[in-house]
Image (tube, grey):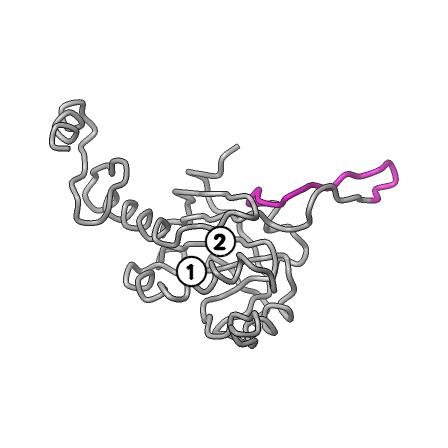
């Protein structure tokens, strides 16, 4: 079942913030009532598509912040792996310069709860577990409003990198809809015409195209 319209699953986990500081009990609850959140998963540290996305988010971080939106990353690696990767220069395959939080989902429970884990556990009659699939997260992205409700999600398979501009567009669409009560048509961007939820409004909009 889709998580859209539901409260974002809560967690407390270790995370690396400010490019190198480890915190023990990071939680998205700190943003409830204060900020929107773009919470995204990526498969693994020290890989190839992942740094392009992580760095692209950092390059747009001022734009997210101007929209009162926090960006938070997450993978199944340990907080120590995150910190080493964050301290490694870009020319050596690292992501040095990234400052937003990156959560450690070493137990894989966060990925499971957000339904992005690329596999599942099977248990025998003695309670022993075997994992089937890849013990990593798909490229899940969740837009969470200030009430802690998931309003948009996107899940890509591992080879398929995401569009950071599209994430920004969805933040704009959500905030516009909340402020004005309008709905945002296909390919809408901030500043463009929106719709009322009436057939006449749709007909008028399509007639202008």
Crowd rating for badge 1 (residues with CA inside 10 Å; few <14, some 14–19, many 20+): many
Which residue in the structure is indicated by mark 2?
A: 40
Residue 140 drawn at (x, y percent) = 51, 47
Q: Quadrant of residue 194?
A: top left
Q: Is residue 36 above or below residue 82?
A: above
Question: For this rendering, which residue is in front, 89 or 190?
Answer: 89
Q: Residue visible at 25% across and 44% down?
A: 178
Disc 2 secondary structure class: strand
Crowd rating for badge 2 (residues with CA inside 10 Å; few <14, some 14–19, many 20+): many
Disc 1 secondary structure class: strand
Furthest toward the top, the residue is 199
Which residue in the structure is indicated by mark 1?
A: 71
Q: Residue visible at 44% across and 61% down?
A: 30
Q: Which residues are magenta?
A: 113-128
Q: CA distance from mark 1 to mark 2?
A: 8 Å
Q: Residue visible at 57% across and 44% down?
A: 116
Lateral position of residue 205 relative to residue 116, left or right:
left
169 inside magenta stretch? no
Label 1–label 2 contact, CB within 8 A: yes
Q: Quadrant of residue 187?
A: top left
């Amino acid at each position: 079942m889709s998580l859209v319209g539901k409260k974002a699953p809560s967690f407390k986990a270790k995370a690396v913030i400010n490019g190198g500081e480890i915190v023990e009990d990071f939680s998205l609850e700190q943003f409830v009532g204060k900020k929107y959140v773009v919470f995204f998963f990526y498969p693994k540290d020290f890989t190839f598509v992942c740094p392009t996305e992580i760095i692209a988010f950092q390059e747009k971080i001022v734009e997210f912040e101007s929209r009162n939106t926090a960006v938070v990353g997450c993978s199944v690696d340990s907080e120590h792996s995150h910190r080493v990767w964050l301290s490694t220069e870009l020319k050596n395959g690292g992501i040095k310069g990234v400052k937003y939080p990156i959560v450690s989902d070493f137990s894989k429970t966060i990925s499971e709860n957000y339904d992005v884990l690329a596999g599942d556990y099977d248990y025998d009659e003695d309670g022993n577990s075997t994992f089937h699939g890849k013990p990593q997260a798909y490229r899940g992205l969740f837009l969470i409003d200030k009430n802690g409700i998931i309003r948009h999600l996107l899940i890509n398979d591992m080879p398929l990198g995401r569009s950071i501009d599209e994430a920004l567009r969805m933040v704009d669409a959500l905030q516009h809809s909340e402020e004005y009560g309008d709905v945002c048509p296909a390919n809408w961007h901030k500043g463009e015409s929106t719709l009322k939820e009436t057939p006449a409004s749709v007909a008028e909009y399509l007639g202008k195209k």
